[in-house]
Every structure is written in C-alpha cells, then in structure tokens.
Amino acid sequence: MLHELHSLKPSDPQRTKIIKELVTGYNEYVFIEDGFRCSFGKNI
C-alpha cells in the first residue's frame, strides 16, 4: 500500500483512500507529507 501511495500525485483522491486504510482516526485535519513510513504496532 505504501508503494502505491508514494507513486500517486498529492492531488490524487486515491491517496486519501489509502491513508484512511493505514491510519486510524485520519480526517480532514490530519496532514501527511510525502515519504510517509508506516510500522506495525499500537500507538506508533
């Protein structure tokens, strides 16, 4: 999923869909910059 996320343009609506799957509690007030890394676990 991260590979696909990093291959999309910042304006692509598919980015939001992927981020919502990766990040619990993601909403319009959250900003994630390019180069996002994701680890498994809780409270990371």
Image (tube, rainbow, N blue to C red):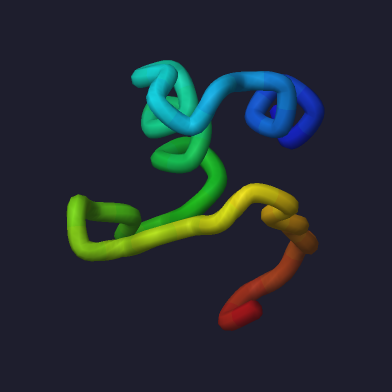
Of residues 9 and 42, the one nearer the viewer is 9
Of residues 36 and 40, the one nearer the viewer is 36
Q: Image quarter for residue 13?
A: top left
Residue drawn at 64 percent across, 29 percent down: 5
Horizontal placement of 29 versus 14: left or right? Answer: left
How many marks overall? Answer: 0
* Residue occupying the far left of the picture: 28
* Residue occupying the far bottom of the picture: 43
Rendering coords of residue 27 (x, y %):
23, 53
Rendering coords of residue 17 (x, y %):
40, 26
Horizontal placement of 6 versus 21: left or right? Answer: right
Vertical order, 19 against 35 (above or below): above
Of residues 35 and 22, the one nearer the viewer is 35
Residue drawn at 38 percent across, 60 percent down: 31
Rendering coords of residue 2 (x, y %):
74, 35
Where's the N terminus, which quadrant?
A: top right
Residue drawn at 78 percent across, 62 percent down: 39
Vertical order, 38 against 14 (above or below): below
Where's the C terminus, which quadrant?
A: bottom right
Rendering coords of residue 37 (x, y %):
76, 57
Vertical order, 39 against 34 (above or below): below
Q: Image quarter for residue 22?
A: top right
